[in-house]
C-alpha cells in the first residue's frame, strides 16, 4: 500500500481507541507497508496486534484523519507501535497553531524591507523565546521593535545540535513592556513569514515533543 505524502518522520499524531482518550505522540519510522509511532506509556494506552485505532496527523495548515490497524509492537528504550497505511483519509483545513512554552535563546536583527527576502542581515542582537509554534512565537527583547516591522531570527531547536539554526523571518504583531527582575524588557509577538514546510515540520515536532514531555512529567 502506498504511503500518503503527509505521513513523515517526526510528524505529530494523535491516537484514539474505541472512542477513548486521545493520546498524542510522534511518527518514528516510515516503511513500505506501514509506519511506526512512539508508544504511549502503558498507563495511557495499550494496543494489541489487529486493534483498530483512529489517527489524526497534525500539520500546520491541515490535519488528516483516518482509521487503521495495529500491525505490531517493538519494545526497547524507545518502544513503538507499527500501524498500517490507510486506505483513505480525510483532510481538514485548520488555522490554529499549537503552542508550547519554550525558553530558547536566539540571535536576531531588524530586516530592512529593501533587503527582504534575499539579503538577510547579520543577527547581532540576542533574545529569548517565551513560547513557540509553527506559525510564530512570543519573544523577550531588550529593545522594542516597531509593530509591523520584520525581524531576522536564527534559532536553534533542541535536538538539532549538529545542524544549522533555523533562519526565519518574523513579522512583529504586538509589543508590550514587561518588568523582569526589576529590569524593563519587551514581550514581542511575531508571526513567521515565508517559512518553509520543512522548517514548520521541525518546529511542530519540537512543540509536540515538549507537550508530550510535560504531560509525562505531570503524570
Image: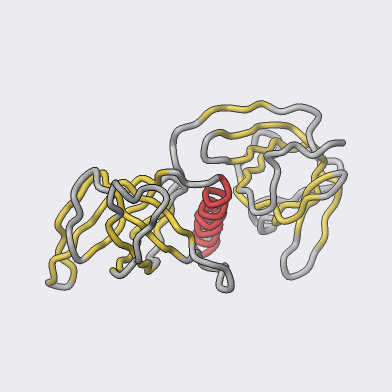
What's the residue at 35%, 45% (across, down)? 191
Q: Give above or below for 136 relative to 88.
A: below
Which residue occupies the foreground of this view, 50 or 211? 211
Whole-percent x and y of residue 30? Answer: 78, 50
Q: Give above or below for 178 relative to 70.
A: below
Whole-percent x and y of residue 38? Answer: 70, 56
How many marks on residues? 0
Q: From the image, which quarter does the N terminus lie in?
A: top right
* Occupied quadrant, residue 83: top right
- Left or right, 38 with reference to 218: right
Whole-percent x and y of residue 45? Answer: 68, 50
Model colouring: secondary structure
What's the residue at 19%, 59% (across, down)? 186
* Occupied quadrant, residue 89: top right
Which residue occupies the foreground of this view, 97 or 42? 97
Whole-percent x and y of residue 164? Answer: 53, 67
What's the residue at 43%, 44% (across, down)? 135
- Left or right, 29 with reference to 64: right
Q: Give above or below for 182 relative to 151.
A: below
What's the residue at 65%, 33% (across, down)? 19
Amino acid at each position: 500500500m502506498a504511503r500518503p505524502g503527509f505521513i513523515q518522520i517526526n510528524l505529530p499524531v494523535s491516537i484514539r481507541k474505541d472512542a477513548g482518550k486521545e493520546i498524542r505522540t510522534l511518527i518514528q519510522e516510515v516503511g513500505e507497508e506501514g509506519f511506526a509511532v512512539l508508544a504511549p506509556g502503558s498507563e495511557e494506552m495499550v494496543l494489541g496486534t489487529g486493534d483498530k485505532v483512529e489517527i489524526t496527523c497534525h500539520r500546520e495548515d491541515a490535519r488528516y484523519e483516518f482509521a487503521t490497524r495495529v500491525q505490531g509492537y517493538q519494545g526497547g528504550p524507545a518502544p513503538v507501535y507499527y500501524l498500517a497505511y490507510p486506505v483513505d483519509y480525510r483532510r481538514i483545513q485548520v488555522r490554529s497553531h499549537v503552542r508550547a512554552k519554550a525558553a530558547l535563546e536566539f540571535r536576531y536583527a531588524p530586516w530592512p524591507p529593501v533587503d527582504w527576502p534575499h539579503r538577510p542581515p547579520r543577527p547581532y542582537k540576542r533574545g529569548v523565546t517565551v513560547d513557540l509554534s509553527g506559525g510564530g512565537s512570543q519573544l523577550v527583547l531588550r529593545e522594542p521593535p516597531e509593530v509591523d516591522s520584520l525581524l531576522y531570527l536564527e534559532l536553534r531547536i533542541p535536538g538539532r545540535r549538529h545542524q544549522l539554526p533555523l533562519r526565519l523571518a518574523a513579522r512583529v504583531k504586538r509589543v508590550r513592556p514587561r518588568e523582569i527582575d526589576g529590569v524593563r524588557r519587551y514581550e514581542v509577538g511575531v508571526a513567521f513569514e515565508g517559512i518553509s514546510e520543512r522548517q514548520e515540520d521541525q518546529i511542530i515536532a519540537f512543540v509536540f515533543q515538549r507537550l508530550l514531555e510535560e504531560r509525562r512529567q505531570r503524570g
